[in-house]
Image (cartoon, rainbow, N blue to C red):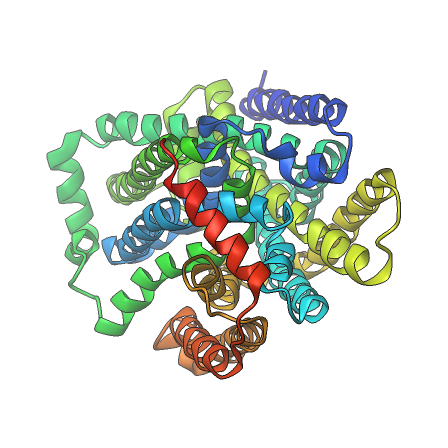
Amino acid sequence: MTENTYQLVAIIIYLAGMILIGWYAYRRTSDLSDYMLGGRKLGPAVSALSAGASDMSQWLLMGLPGAIYVSGLVEGWIAIGLTIGAWLNWLFVAPRLRVYTQVSNNSITIPSFFDNRFKENSKILRIVSGIIILVYFTFYVSSGMVAGGVFFESSFGYDYHVGLVVVAAVVIAYTLLGGFLAVSYTDFVQGSIMFLALIIVPILGIFLTGGIGETVESIRAVDVNLLSFFATATATGVISSLAWGLGYFGQPHIIVRFMAIKDVKETKSARRIGIGWMILTLLGAAFTALIGVAYFQQNPGVSLSNPEAIFIEMGQIIFHPFIAGIMLAAVLAAIMSTVSSQLLVTSSALVEDIYKSVINSNASEARYVNLGRIAVLIVSVVAGVFAWQQNDTILGLVSFAWAGFGAAFGPIILLALYWRKITGTGALWGMIVGAVTVFIWGNTALSGYLYEIVPGFLLNLIVTYVVSIATYKPNQEVEEEFNKTMELLKEPK
């Protein structure tokens, strides 16, 4: 068999496995709660790796290595900010959100939690939240489809559009079939593949480039600044990179895993598993990029056409074609895990938060589930149209969507969980201000000086606080739910 054939066989086996998992989950999905939240039955390992895989996405194996390959460790500040943000998210948001969403009318989406938590402006809050999810997740899903096209183009020489369609078709298939359980189980498998790939590639790659000493010298021969966190850094650049960590508090496709974990007691185990996985995979991605710099310096006759394909190229150089195919499956895993999670959250926004709450709240569960599947298909088509012309980097698309969610939802989530006096009116105006600030800032020259999540997050926080103080009125039901949540969190663990 040819090299490409070996790799295609490995990819086909992987894709078939994902669809089989989707079918298995389909058999265990009976109502909307199952389809959107897996019946709140996830264990800590599945929750942790599912959150990690859906979080890191194609950015981990393509965006971050590509950025470090071009600019060096100065791009590592993003990874540091993300690690801190993820740890704080598991520590401060996960336990409270798991308990509070169940106490507050068993909320199964972020917009429905806002509705049930504030007891005011319920319809408009859900609609605005749903619209924000639709807008920013369309960009996010689009970035995954761009990554799929780049993947097949770089790996097999196929047309960009062929890769885009293949990835979209498989993700749509298993997300349509099995909903949240399918997404979570496939995320667990995909997270495991990503972990192994990012550990093995740099470990074997260092031997290929002559050991640590020779590798460092080769990198310095290209540019001595590539190994420095500070040489080319600016104060606003470091702040912008670290600010990526703020985004975690508002990412619906990540924090929904906190709502689905089986028991609040298991959030501690999940946090340890998730952060351990994250640190090791981020280190693996960074080392893969640096080893790639050394390899191509040592082999000037070999060229790299796309820096975001450095992990793919190194896997093909190091391994037998079939094993390289498994490494390639890790890239597909990163792409597909995130796209599927985002499609599901967008579907829930359309069905649970817009259709069910505003249009028809009396339909059967089967109808809601089917509408959820139709919504997945519609959002996929729209995102595919955006991705058809590859006009931005993967990191660029991801950073814009990440900022949008972090600035729109992050402050609201934190205040809703920790501050009794936040009001629905305050949350609504803060959310709008955060989302609009990111959209305007991110589409002007200002984004080149400071990452748009910083002004968006801060303005949301200020507006929400000021408006809430001005509109606060005691509500007995809100007080009772807040107190009950605090009591449940204090129970022996």
Residue 61 shows up from this direction:
no
- State left or right for residue 371 relative to residue 69: right
Q: Is residue 403 above or below residue 303?
A: below
Q: Residue furthest front?
A: 476
Query: Which quadrant: the C terminus?
Result: top left
**Image quadrant in which the N terminus is located:** top right
Identify which residue is drawn at 58% across, 28% down: 185
Nearest to the observer: residue 346 or residue 412: 412
In this image, 147 relative to 227: left or right? right
Relative to the observer, which residue lies in front, 395 or 98?
A: 98
Residue 26: % across, % down = 75, 27
Q: Residue at x 80, y 63 (%)?
A: 358
| Residue nearest the viewer, comparing 299 with 169 | 169
Is 322 situated left or right of 230 in this image? right
User: Looking at the image, which is closer to me, 290 or 276?
Assistant: 276
Measured along the vertical axis of the image, is residue 386 above or below residue 424?
above
- Name the residue rendered at 89%, 47% in the picture: 363
Q: Residue furthest top?
A: 1
Would you place residue 356 above or below residue 60 in this image? below
Q: Examine the image and state in which quarter residue 301 appears.
A: top left
Q: Quadrant of residue 349?
A: bottom right
Q: Position of residue 191 (x, y in %)?
A: 47, 31
Residue at x 63% of width, y 48% of height:
107
The picture places residue 97, in percent across and down from the top left corner, at: 49, 48
Q: Is residue 284 visible?
A: yes
Residue 101: x, y in percent?
56, 48
Q: How many marks?
A: 0
Quadrant of the image occupied by residue 33: top right
